[in-house]
Image: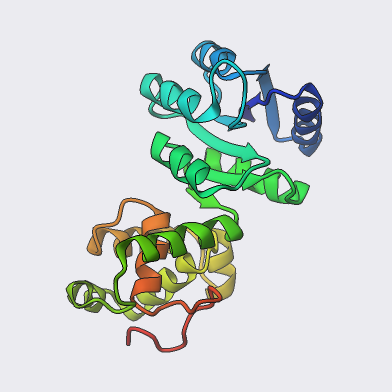
Amino acid sequence: MIRVLVVDDQALVRAGVGLLLRTAGEFEVVGEAGDGHDAVRLAERLRPDVVLMDLRMPRLDGIEATRRILDRQPGARVLVLTTFAEDTDIYGALGAGAVGYLVKDGAPEELIDAVRRAARGESLLAPPVLARIVHRALADHDRERRPAPREPGLRLLSPREREVLALVGGGLSNSEIGARLHLGVTTVKTHVSAAMEKLDLRNRVQAAVVAHRLGLVDDDFNPVPGAGD
């Protein structure tokens, strides 16, 4: 069972999310918190596998609560679930150590899958959120899509690693990449890890940004056939 702490300042949201997770049959909702202070306290006491974290709450917001939880429990997984998708919120949450960022208007099955993936240690973002981050990063750095300093690193990748990196850039999960390429999830993880190590990348968000800069993914987040060959 995946142990989950649900954090939201609205009791109705906490109840609904808790019911959804319990109904799925593979989650145990070990606690609920209505603000960041209670979230930090309960996370330390209950040691959940995943913390579902709202951002805008009284007393202590979700970004600071995430930072405090991970300072005390580096192995915890905090997954943001919020109504807001502002750039400052996204950057703040990821900077505090959240593994993913979802908005509340998503489908129930997306939330269930996200909690599963967070528990496995995957970083994840809803595709619209990933798109925002990538475009913001590209604009901030104001670099060409194919910068020369990265080209030697790209040539270090095998054709399969380039293909996998392009799909990471498109926002696909490991299981989705495996289905697309007819590979096992373990094999996909191996290719993702190898590509990230060769390009000195720390997480999938960085991998997505690099995939865009290198022209492996187009502006609609679709892999570019033959790019990087």
Q: How many marks?
A: 0
**In this image, 145 relative to 63: left or right?**
left
Instruction: Kindly indicate the quadrant of the structure image that contains residue 19.
Output: top right
**In this image, 103 relative to 224: left or right?**
right
Instruction: Give the answer, above or below, for where 139 lies relative to 107.
Output: below
Which residue is at a point 51% across and 77% down the rendered structure image? 219
Q: Position of residue 222 (x, y in %)?
A: 54, 77
Q: Position of residue 89 (x, y in %)?
A: 52, 41
Which residue is at a point 75% across and 24% down the rendered structure image? 10
Which residue is at a point 37% across and 52% down the rendered structure image? 203
User: Looking at the image, can residue 161 be seen?
Assistant: no
**In this image, 111 relative to 88: left or right?**
right
- Seen from the viewer's position, the closer of residues 25 and 201 is 201
State the quadrant of the N terminus.
top right
Q: Position of residue 40 (x, y in %)?
A: 51, 16
Instruction: Kindly indicate the quadrant of the structure image that contains residue 42.
Output: top right
**In this image, 205 relative to 36: left or right?**
left
Q: Position of residue 113 (x, y in %)?
A: 65, 48
